[in-house]
Amino acid sequence: MSDKDYYLDQVKQCVSFIFKDKGSGEKKPIGTGFFVGIKSEYDDVVYLVTAKHVLQKCPGEFYDKIFVRLNAKETGFAEYMDIDLTKYVILTHSDESVDLAATFLRPNPNFFDYRLITQDYFSNSIILKKKNIREGSNVFFPGLFTNFYGELKNFPILRFGRISLLIDERIEIHEKGQPPKLAHLYFVECQSLGGFSGSPVFFERDRITPGGPFSSPEIYLGGVMKGHYNDTLETPRGIVRELNASLALVTPCYQLNELLNSEAAIKDRESAAKDAGL
């Protein structure tokens, strides 16, 4: 197995599939989540991270219940965790334009087969500059393909592309039923579909060295998949249609770092530690 195959196998194990209750016992896939491990002075904690809109039935209102689907270690088959969100603290960014949500969730590591993404893999402006990660650098992300996610077990789909634009300005985005808003996002040359919302997006450092061979893969969490960028087309009859511009929008990793180290997150960890008697 090559180094790259090894990394891809690992990143696929970081993701889970998120479902909502469709009614009559049916579950509908709505997005991707992944697990982040944070070292705390009280105890190491694990968060389920996804895009905020994945957990919301409408802006500002979260689902009461979701199902998180993971493969079991012993059987290899997928199992569901029923999550009553009304009993969880859902962390969101202080900036409402940031499409991120995180909540404590540590699946039993003896039962479920999954991996954590630690903060060692988080990117920031210093790392991007030092590692020469920029427009044209490789990108990949594992996630839920709603048309096929596996009947017996989770099969994350991997999508590959390149960074199209890294900027420090906000861009105007248009979301259905909401007024236009400004948000800081990265552009990725890769089409994203609905189920990939919430996927971890990895940047890969250029592995070709001048005059030398390929080096081992070096990857960093670039951010969290928000969704595709919509363009609009007005037909001769005046009908406005939304078009997928084959560009994906990624919430930058530094905003995830801000969320997980926010005052609200620290208080949440302190409260959890107190409840656990730590």
Image (tube, rainbow, N blue to C red):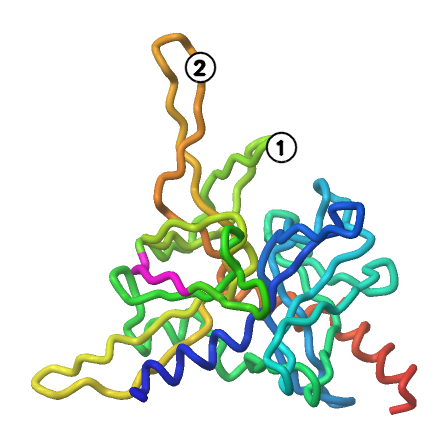
Q: Nearer the viewer, residue 18 or 72?
A: 72
Q: Main secondary structure of the magenta part?
A: strand
- Secondary structure state at the residue bearing disc 2: loop
x 60%, y 47%: residue: 97
Q: Is residue 149 left or right of residue 102?
A: left
x and y, in percent, of residue 177 in the image:
63, 30
Q: Residues within 10 Å of mark 1 (few under 14, many from 20)?
A: few
Q: Amino acid at mark 1?
A: Gln
Alpha-carbon distance for marks 1 and 2?
19 Å
Residue segment shown in magenta: 158-163
Q: Please identify the quarter of the rendering in which residue 240 is found.
A: top left
- Does the segment drawn in magenta span residue 115? no
x and y, in percent, of residue 270 in the image:
83, 80
- Does the segment drawn in magenta span residue 159? yes
Disc 2 target residue = 239
Disc 1 target residue = 178
Q: Residues within 10 Å of mark 2 (few under 14, many from 20)?
A: few
Quarter holding the N terminus? bottom left
Comes first in the chain, label 1 or label 2: 1
Q: Amino acid at mark 2?
A: Ile
